Image: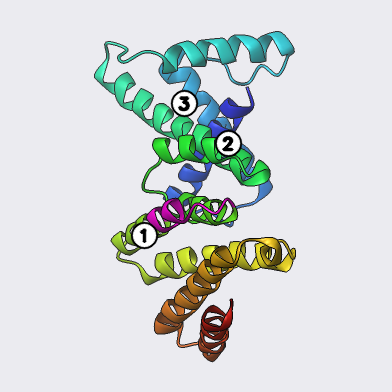
Amino acid sequence: MKRIIKALSLLLIAVILATGLSGCTEAGRDLLMGFVQEWINTKFGIDMTDTSTSGRIIAGIKLAALLGRNSTGNADADAALGTVKMITNFAQADNLMEQGRKTDNATAMDQAIALRPRDYSYRASRATLALKQNDYKTAEKNFKAGEDYAYYDHNQSATVRFYSQYINELEDWKNTGKLDQAPVWTQINVYGNLCTCYARRYDITKDPKDKQMADYYGYLNEHTK
């Protein structure tokens, strides 16, 4: 049921963004949530407004059965079903990635990436975890894929977000002191990756702090033995 609620929330967010109402009031958001619930009920006859335990269970069973179908036999309903499946797929992937990040679970992360292979934020986290586990090939593979997918957006802000996330995750790991306990080659890889990300972000932002950090980690990369 948690996944269903998250899926509906994502649909609500999509509606808010599409209508330009991201700054709407609580009453406005409630109105949109009512729209989502009515949309589900109208398209598929599933009542999401029943908050009783039995009502939630029935709605969950019906929605799970619906998602298992390839077609409803109606073109309009199939289009709506495709939307629900897409959102549910996102919710499932997001839950797996959240689990992977919290518990350093590579399997959960890989399952999330299989569902959403072009999500560069997933790739950044997978690359970080691979370095923690001294798996340099997997780290390099996911960093390169994430960077490429960020570039594919043809939006520099996406590339900056990718580099920023990877920098933050590696910096967080470093600040725990656990990186100091890792093999020297892992430390060298981390410092080299931080140098690269800061330098490439500097190419976009022209922030002198990025240049300073790139030089700092470049020095550590060269002098760590």
Q: Along the line of sight, which residue is nearer the eye, 205 or 33? A: 205
Does the segment drawn in magenta span residue 138?
yes
Q: Secondary structure at mark 2?
A: helix
Q: Position of residue 65 (x, y in %)?
A: 46, 11
Look at the image and tell me whether residue 20 can be seen: no
What is the crowding at mark 2: few (fewer than 14 residues within 10 Å), some, or many (at least 20)?
some
Looking at numbered disc 3 in the image, what kind of residue is underneath it? Answer: Trp
Looking at numbered disc 1 in the image, what kind of residue is underneath it? Answer: Lys
Does the segment drawn in magenta span residue 159?
no
Count of numbered badges drawn on the protein: 3
Q: Secondary structure at mark 3?
A: helix
What is the crowding at mark 3: few (fewer than 14 residues within 10 Å), some, or many (at least 20)?
some
Magenta stretch bounds: 133-142
Residue at 60%, 9% (x, y): give it.
58
Measured Cα–Cα span from mark 3 to mark 2: 24 Å
Measured Cα–Cα span from mark 3 to mark 1: 40 Å
Q: Earlier in the sequence, mark 3 or mark 2?
A: 3
Q: Position of residue 175 (x, y in %)?
A: 72, 68
What is the crowding at mark 1: few (fewer than 14 residues within 10 Å), some, or many (at least 20)?
some
Query: In which quadrant of the rendered image does the N terminus lie?
Result: top right
Q: Position of residue 82 (x, y in %)?
A: 34, 27
Report the residue marked by disc 3. Answer: 39
Looking at numbered disc 2 in the image, what kind of residue is underneath it? Answer: Asn
Q: Position of residue 66 (x, y in %)?
A: 43, 14
| Quadrant of the image occupied by residue 78 | top left
Report the residue marked by disc 2. Answer: 95
Q: Earlier in the sequence, mark 3 or mark 1?
A: 3
Tell me the tag on residue 144. Answer: 1
Q: Earlier in the sequence, mark 1 or mark 2?
A: 2
Tell me the tag on residue 156. Answer: none
